[in-house]
Amino acid sequence: MTYVITAAHPDDAATLGPMHLQNWLRNYPNADAGIDESWIREHRGSSATAEGVAEWREFIEVANQQHPAPHFCRVVRSKTEIVGYLCGHQEPESITLGPMYLLDHAQGHGLGGHMMTEFLAWAGSARIRLGVVDNNERAIRFYQRHGFEIAGESYLWRGKLPTLPMTREAPSAADGD
């Protein structure tokens, strides 16, 4: 199967919004934590609504039109299907990575690493932050391979989702020697 990583196009918003919700519904239910479909729909369901899709479209348009862009958004395509994405945005003191997802059948092909390489190039020397579900060991190892370190204790996102903060500090001048 052939995969291509490209900048997201504003029309991709119609796929990314619902895909974001579906990934949450597939990956984050946790009966012990009280995270069920209704909780996920309450906290992430808006991404699949007309308003949520419009927000995705605006995010992508800004990422594609402003230089330097305050947003980053790449998608992975297999023919005409979007099978993954990585987005991020600049904040005053750092850059936040997320969301990042690859459908199961697109994992294991190096696509996450390629998207991360593009993201890190966009981020430059900035400090990068992210939150990862604390039982997602595969994702934690992936981020660690790309220079991220655990940056504190797990916290409950929106009072329920166990989330581990990770950071990648700005490379120092000595790192390039």
Image: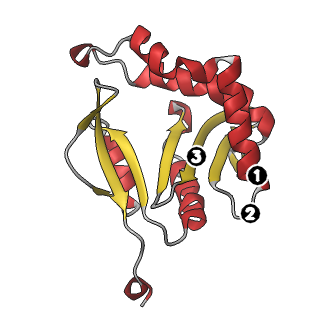
- Picture coordinates of residue 82, whole percent (x, y): 68, 34
- Rendered residue at 40%/48% (across/down): 130
Q: Which residue is mark 2?
A: 67
- Picture coordinates of residue 118, whole percent (x, y): 60, 60
Quadrant housing the C terminus: bottom left
Q: State the mark number for residue 64.
A: 1
31 relative to 106 in the view: left or right: left
Marks 2 and 3, the one that precedes in the sequence = 2
Task: Using the image as rendered, state which of residue 116 and residue 105 is in the foreground.
Answer: 116
Quadrant housing the N terminus: top right
Q: CA distance from mark 3 to mark 1?
A: 12 Å
Q: Are the residues flagged by discs 2 and 1 in contact, CB closer than 8 Å? A: no
Mark 2 packing: few (<14 Cα in 10 Å), some, or many (20+)?
Answer: few
Q: CA distance from mark 2 to mark 3?
A: 16 Å
User: Can you tell which quarter of the image residue 12 is in?
Assistant: top right
Give the residue furthest to the top.
38
Q: State the mark number for residue 87.
A: 3
Q: Secondary structure at mark 1?
A: helix
172 relative to 119 in the view: left or right: left
Mark 3 packing: few (<14 Cα in 10 Å), some, or many (20+)?
Answer: many
Q: Secondary structure at mark 3?
A: strand
User: Can you tell which quarter of the image residue 154 is in?
Assistant: top left
- Rendered residue at 40%/81% (across/down): 172
Q: Above or below — where is 47 with respect to 112?
A: above
Mark 1 packing: few (<14 Cα in 10 Å), some, or many (20+)?
Answer: some
Q: CA distance from mark 2 to mark 1?
A: 8 Å
